[in-house]
Amino acid sequence: MKSKNQAVFALIVKSTVVFLPLLLSVGIATGQSAPSPSPALTPTPVLSNQEREELARLRAEKRIQQQVQSDFNSAFSRTTILLNIWLVILSLFPVAIIALFWLLRRVVIREIVDKAIQQIQGLEKLQNQLTTVKQEAENVIQEAKKINYELEQQTTILRQKIKDEQENISILSSEVDLAKAQVLNRLETELKKSQENIETLEAKFASGLSKLEFDAQQQRDIALENLGKLTSVMAEELSNLKLGVQQQQELAVANLEVSRSEFTSQLSGWQSDTQKQKDMAVENLTNLQSEFADQLSELQVDAQKQKEITFDNLGKLDNQLKSQLSELQIDAQEQKNKIVENLAALQLEFTEKLSELQVDAKKCKELIIENLEKSGSEFTSQFSELQWNAQQQKILILEKLERLETEFVSQLSELQLDAQERKDLILQELTEITPESIPEIVNSEVEEEVEEQPQQPEFTADEYVKQGDELFSQRRYEEAIAAYNQAVKIQPDEPVAWLKGGLTLGRLKRYKDAIASYDRAIAIQPDYHQAWCDRGVAFGNLQQHQQAFASFDKATQIKPDDAVAWLNRGLSLVALEQYEEAMVSLEKAREFQPNSPKIWDKRGYTLVRLGRDDEAIASFNKALEIKSDYASAYYNKAACYALQRQVELSLLTLQQAIELNPRYKEDAASDLDFDEIADDQRFKQLVAE
């Protein structure tokens, strides 16, 4: 450091030596007197003695004056040279002081930075070791979590299998009971009919026809005897059927018990393996923690020693700097008074230049404002284009959702038809097992002496409605609409028939016709709550959300405690992007139905749109707490994490949503909420699988 200071002082001395000859040459040049002009050669006139004396006196005075002038000029030049030298020295002296301070500061900072960098490098090494240890621990924990997750999945699968078997047994037993009840009801009805027919015959042929009465009595006895035999046969067959069902139930229960015991043994083995791995991980963590504590204590001791050495060096440097600074302050104070005068003159020039710069800055400011206005207009146009593109994408997404909904409805109808066919086959098998000859024997014995039954009367409006309900449950919508139309033809002021016709039209995607049917029901009964609700649903399917909101609002006014109406009112406001008002409706729905996962899910989605992400996550977690396999809550939660740029959590949650409902894979690929993580390779793989 001393060598650097000596070099600085040498540089200052050299600069003064370089500038001194220049200044001296300037001063000598200015101090030299101007050469006197040579007198012109003139002819010498003849002068008198008096004139010669006067001329000599004038020449002597002129020589004296020239001598004085030359002395004055030389003194003035020497004074000017000295002033120039002092000004150069004074101008160089602050520069040298500043350079000296800068060099000293640079050296001190460099030493401090080197020491600090060394300590930071040591801390970085420690931090790297900590991160590696932490990563290993997290890997062990993740493995344990994966094992637990697999165990939970296998447990849920087994529970679901047990539940399915129990449901199948219950369904089978219920169908057997139903078939038994139907057979008994048919027997009872046939018996009643036969008794009524016999009574009518007795009343008709009682007078004068004793022989026929005797024959009828014999036939009646024969019929009763046959009925007794058939009932005994039917009872035996039913007991055999019950015995077979009971044996199948016992076998199923035995199989379930065996699988449960096997699963419990496997589960215990897995739990023991998991416990062993957990103990090993904890032991490794404790060993790493002890090693890290030893290394950390050694590093702290070394850091403390280096800190003390650094403080000693800084104390010495501080003392040296203080002594030099006091000397420099004294010299600087003396120079300050001389420099202030020069600064006053410079200030005048600076104010003039400053005014010019202010004028230029004002012009630049105006140009910048114009450019900003132009860029603002361009930004607004670009933002409007982006909004339009987002609206187009939203419309496309809604169209995709509608197509998916139609596909889902068709698949669901196919499944229901398959279930109905299976049910019909089971009932057919049961009817084949039961003797079908019972009503035929009774009818054959009675039809010989009974006149033909009268024709069925025409259906009433209620019967047409019931027929339409049955066809609706069988998804025969066109026939159901025909039945409801017959009902309203017979009784046009019945709002229920108009409502059910609208529901059936809605299933056929004929939403405008459905709205017309709902309007007829409302015209008949203005406070028909269900008609207002279904009318709002139809408007929502037509993307007419303002009319849908009006319908749901009217439904909530008629029945303020209907959670579904409040929920639909909130969803229509969400579609209209009125999120604050939508939150009010969703809170009302949650008040009347606090355990609905759909309400909690839609509440979380609305909170995401309001930018209240933490509350939204809590709402999604509540929905999943109520129903752990609610895929929509997982999907919306993943979108919220994506907006927060929490990539890991978003991908994990989105994967759970896709596992529960694979259609979310396509939705996530085109969802704007996932734009923040759309460039991530894992996200691309997840939506492309």
Image (cartoon, grey):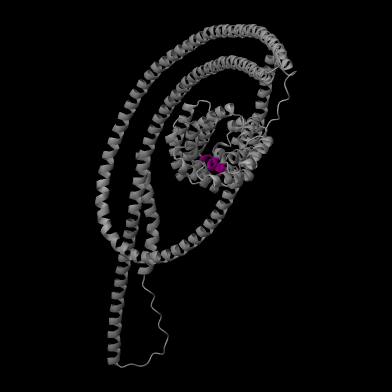
The magenta span reads: 529-536
Q: Quadrant of the C terminus?
A: top right
Residue 543 location, x and y as percent? 59, 45
Of 47 and 177, nearer the camera is: 177
As drawn, is 139 to the left or to the right of 189?
left
Q: Residue at x 30, y 81 (%)?
A: 62
Q: Residue at x 38, y 74 (%)?
A: 34
Of 469 and 246, nearer the camera is: 469
The magenta stretch spans residue 355 = no
The magenta stretch spans residue 531 = yes
As drawn, is 609 to the left or to the right of 88?
right
Report which quarter residue 664 is drawn in. Answer: top right
Residue 686 location, x and y as percent? 60, 30
Report which quarter residue 508 is drawn in. Answer: top right
Residue 647 location, x and y as percent? 52, 33
Q: Main secondary structure of the magenta part?
A: helix
As drawn, is 228 to the left or to the right of 284?
right
Of 548 and 371, nearer the camera is: 548
Residue 292 visible in rendering: yes
As drawn, the residue found furthest toward the front would be 208
Of 398 and 417, nearer the camera is: 417
Residue 193, above or below 1: above
Residue 546 location, x and y as percent? 54, 48
As drawn, is 140 to the left or to the right of 171?
left
Residue 410, above or below 672: above
Report which quarter residue 420 is drawn in. Answer: top right
Q: Quadrant of the N terminus?
A: top left
Residue 324, above or below 462: below
